[in-house]
Image (cartoon, rainbow, N blue to C red):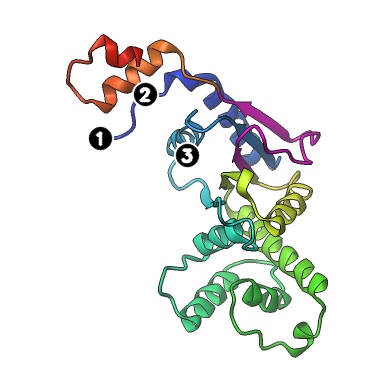
Amino acid sequence: KGLTPFKGRSMEMTRLMDCYKKTGEGEGQVIGIMGEPGMGKSRLVLEFIQSLPAGAYINLSGSCQHFGDAIPYLPIVEIIGDYLDIKDGDNETVIREKAAAKISQLEGIPETVIPPLHEFLSLKVDDKSYSKLDGKQRRDKVFDSIRLLLFAESRAKPLVIVVDDLHWIDHTSEEFLGYLVNSIAATRIMLVLLYRPEYTHSWSKKTYYSQIQLGHLPGDTSKDLIQAILDDGDVDSDINDL
């Protein structure tokens, strides 16, 4: 049926489109969408993504889980898995082949990204010198490898990367996002972060950061949404009030 009109968020949509335009011009953007549960954060992003010109961008997404704060890289694994087109059930050989095929298509990517990428994807690492590095050194190389992949891809098309439920993010993923945020100012990457008001972060002072705060929809727009959900049936005024 498609999506219902989202005219109650027209101002927010305009801000997102402005950020997307800047991203396409090589000015990386970070957008925080903040709101209590049920305020329409995910819906706003869905409307925004579907309003972009088909084939002109690459959309990648990952979600944090309320039980996932102890699982390193949880949303980042989803994002890179989305990027590499890794499916549930892909074995190690298939994942290696998909990663190698993607890397071969990119310009300016050194072979040194392969060992940390393999470790990140929970694959066997064949590089003995890499395996001898300590934990922090390997983590730094993982961060840099993912950054290089995303930067290289963004030179072909703008990237719109969405991370949902940031208030549940694990510590390692949060560190990586901070690392990425610090380096995207001159890229074609738009990072859209969804979170509840209790979440705090360190990048609010970046000149390329903006925040959209969502409250309740206006009454008329809420009624339009109810009517759309219920198709062509008559909506009782008590339902609207509720």
Q: At 38% from the left edge and 18% from the top edge, which residue is drawn?
A: 222
- Image quadrant where one finds the C terminus: top left
Give how far across and how far down residue 207 sits, in percent: 79, 33
Q: In this view, does 34 lie above or below 139?
A: above
218 or 117: which is nearer to us?
A: 218
Secondary structure beneath dot 1 equals loop
The amino acid marked with disc number 3 is: Ile
Residue 211 drawn in magenta: yes
- Within 10 Å of disc 3 (Cα), the crowding (few <14, some 14-19, many 20+) is some
In space, the residues marked 2 and 3 are separated at their CA atoms by: 14 Å
**Element marked by disc 3:** helix
Report the residue at 73% width, 38% height from top: 200
Q: Name the residue under label 3.
A: 49
Q: Which residue is drawn at 28% across and 24% down?
A: 228
Q: Quadrant of residue 130?
A: bottom right
Location of mark 2 (residue): 5
| Separation (CA) of disc 2 from disc 1 | 12 Å
